[in-house]
Image (tube, grey):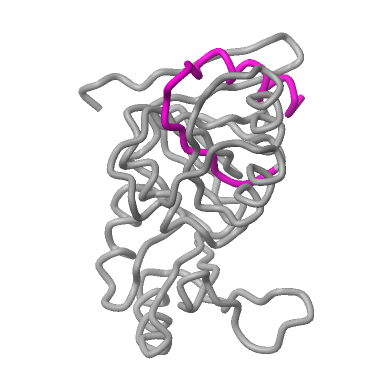
Amino acid sequence: MKKRCAQEALAYIQDGMVIGLGGGSTIAHLARFIKESGKQVQVVTPSQETEALCVELGLSLLPLRQIAHVDIAFDGCDEADRQFYALKSGGGIHVREKLIANMADEYMLLIDESKLSDTLQFRVPIVIELLEDASAYVKRKVEELGGRFVYKHGEGKYGALMSDHGNVLADVWFERVEDARKLNHALKCIAGVLDTSLLTREVTAILVVSDQGFEVLKKDSDK
């Protein structure tokens, strides 16, 4: 199903585009399909794994720091809803993912129907990237918001998992979220928090694959 989703996404890519490719297995399939198609594109990515795959495939890579505009960017997520909110919990690269999303004319999520709901269920945590010196303060402020703060740990690693930027990563769990946009704003306003893995304004399109076929949800420009 992930391959089918990636194959469908290929239709949105044209020669000469600068495209963003996030992380994960669906995006890896898309990278391989781009190579097989022969389409001439330049790629920016927040993911070291995707970067390594693009090098292996011989796709043209651009340094993110030199790019101010992306034609279209593709990414996966753990949950998405019909308000075009989305939640990512995995790789801890959401700061760069959101940067690319904001650069892009179109930011399209590639998901299967099991990840789509009317409103986010928060079955996975929000990941926050924060300054190490702010850890105790951020933990207190998260708890004041009703959340549970847990340092993110990697397998076989002692201490908190760090982002590619050298900052602390933490999982923040909320049992009940009535307003995702309001919560995201509150988290981002905590001093020391760089960004969250909750997307409330970046997503412009969602490509949903199911056993019955495909559905493309497009965000109204006034939302």
Residue 204 placed where, x, y %?
38, 28
Find the magenta span and give its range.
1-24
Count of numbered badges drawn on the protein: 0
User: Is 220 situated above or below 177?
Assistant: above
- What residue is shown at x 51% (from left), y 33% (from top)? 74
Q: Is residue 42 above or below residue 4?
A: below
Q: Quadrant of residue 131?
A: bottom left
- Left/right placement of residue 29 relative to residue 188 reads right
User: In this rendering, would 33 be left or right of 48?
Assistant: right
Residue 51: % across, % down: 60, 50
Magenta stretch: includes residue 14:
yes
Assign the N terminus to one quadrant of the image.
Answer: top right
The quarter of the picture where residue 95 lies is: bottom left
Instruction: Where is residue 20? Give x, y as percent.
Output: 47, 38
Q: Residue at x 35, y 55 (%)?
A: 65
Q: Position of residue 100 (x, y in %)?
A: 39, 45
